[in-house]
Amino acid sequence: MYKTIVDVEGMMCENCEKHMNERIEAKFDVKGVTSSHKKAVTEIISEEKLDEEKLKAEIAEIGYQVIEIQVEPYEKKKFSLFHK
């Protein structure tokens, strides 16, 4: 699994966040997407690495600009009552 962190310019409100999330969910095979206009970031969880050029193009098409993309391995946190 991978976590893709996209620094985005142009999101101004919660509707922008929703617009971004819906576009990414529609165009890519992802497990989850969250966006924050206050932090100017979108985080994407996916099984496979995303095509960064396609990601930039899709984001540009809806009116936002990608500043930077970072990809890191993602491991789902396991829940434990005993904190082991």
Image (cartoon, rainbow, N blue to C red):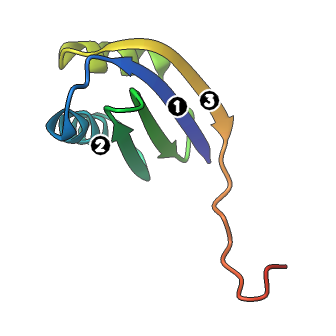
Q: Amino acid at mark 2?
A: Glu
Q: Which image quadrant for residue 40?
A: top left
Q: Residue furthest front?
A: 38
Q: Residue at x 20, y 40 (%)?
A: 14
Query: For mark 3, what is the residue?
Result: 71
Q: Which image quadrant for residue 25?
A: top left
Q: Residue furthest left?
A: 15
Asked if labels 3 and 1 touch by Cβ distance under 8 angstroms, the answer is yes
Q: Residue at x 59, y 24 (%)?
A: 70
**Is residue 51 shown left or right of residue 19?**
right
Residue 15: image location, x then y, percent:
14, 38
**Is residue 14 shown left or right of residue 47?**
left
Q: Amino acid at mark 1?
A: Ile
Separation of disc 1 and disc 2 at Cα? Answer: 15 Å
Separation of disc 1 and disc 3 at Cα? Answer: 6 Å
Separation of disc 3 and disc 2 at Cα? Answer: 17 Å
Q: Residue at x 85, y 79 (%)?
A: 84
Residue 52: image location, x then y, percent:
48, 19
- Whether residue 50 is visible: no
- The disc placed on residue 34 is none
Residue 4: image location, x then y, percent:
53, 33
Q: Residues within 10 Å of mark 3 (few under 14, many from 20)?
A: some
Q: Nearer the viewer, mark 1 or mark 2?
A: 1
Query: For mark 1, what is the residue?
Result: 5
Query: For mark 2, what is the residue?
Result: 25
Q: Residue furthest bottom?
A: 81
N-terminal label among 1 and 2: 1
N-terminal label among 1 and 3: 1
Q: Residues within 10 Å of mark 1 (few under 14, many from 20)?
A: some
Query: Is 31 above or below relative to 83?
Result: above
Q: Amino acid at mark 3?
A: Val
Query: Is 51 above or below relative to 63?
Result: below
